[in-house]
Image (tube, rainbow, N blue to C red):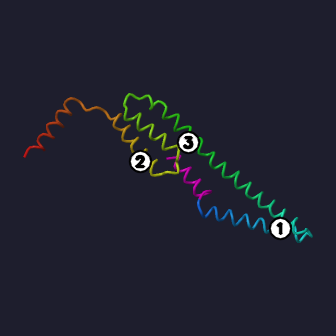
Amino acid sequence: MELQGVAAANRLLWEGPAERGRTFLLTVLAFAGGAARARIAGGTDVQSGLVGFGRAAELLSRERVASKQTVAAVREPLTRAATAAAPLLRCSDPAVVTATEQLLNALSDVEDTARLEAALAAFGRAVNAATAPRLSWWARRRAARTTRRAALP
């Protein structure tokens, strides 16, 4: 769940169309502002263009660093998930092993939330089934008797 939260925050902060539009608009404004300043200071057209490109490059550089820092935040939850999954891959129950493998595969693409949620649900069911306490002999016999009575007309 933590991994999904980090991926959603990354998508919201850096990858959405609105954010890309804002970045583009800020870049254009930085370029225009830098060019205008250079022109006001008495620079030529070429010099003002170069200053504008420099301002735009600075802004894009800061955006890129911030984006990479956000993406790096995904590394820690991925490491914890892989560390927690390692013992489960050696479990004697094949359903748990399969569900764990599917979950790790789904974690490789946290943007695919439907696949990740399905893998989490399958993992939860497999682990619950594997760790559920086994009914006593009397309880199993009582359950079988109740099932047979319900089946009789």
Going by the numbered disc 1, the residue's amino acid type is Ala
Q: In the image shown, does 136 or 107 lie closer to the viewer?
A: 107
- The residue indicated by pointer 1 is 35
Q: Secondary structure at mark 1?
A: helix
- The residue indicated by pointer 2 is 118
Q: Earlier in the sequence, mark 3 or mark 2?
A: 3
Q: Earlier in the sequence, mark 3 or mark 1?
A: 1
The label number, if any, that marks residue 7 in the structure image: none
| Percent x, y of residue 33 | 80, 68
Going by the numbered disc 2, the residue's amino acid type is Ala
Going by the numbered disc 3, the residue's amino acid type is Pro
What residue is shown at x 78% (from left), y 65% (from top)?
31
- The residue indicated by pointer 3 is 77
Q: Quadrant of residue 133?
A: top left
Q: In this rendering, would 144 be left or right of 14? A: left
Q: Quadrant of residue 134?
A: top left
Find out whether residue 22 is within the magenta segment: no
Q: Bounds of the magenta span?
A: 1-15
| Percent x, y of residue 76 | 59, 41
Q: Secondary structure at mark 3?
A: helix
What residue is shown at x 66% (from left), y 52% (from top)?
67
How crowded pointer 3 is (Cα within 10 Å; few <14, some 14-19, many 20+) is rated as some
Number of marks in picture: 3
Q: In the image shown, does 138 or 42 lie closer to the viewer?
A: 42
Q: Secondary structure at mark 2?
A: helix
Find out whether residue 5 is within the magenta segment: yes
Q: Quadrant of residue 48?
A: bottom right
Real-space CA distance between mark 2 and mark 1, rounded to the nearest whole angstrom: 52 Å
Position of residue 3 relative to residue 50, above or below, is: above
Q: Farthest residue toward the left?
A: 153
- Frontmost of labels 3 and 2 is 2
How crowded pointer 1 is (Cα within 10 Å; few <14, some 14-19, many 20+) is rated as many
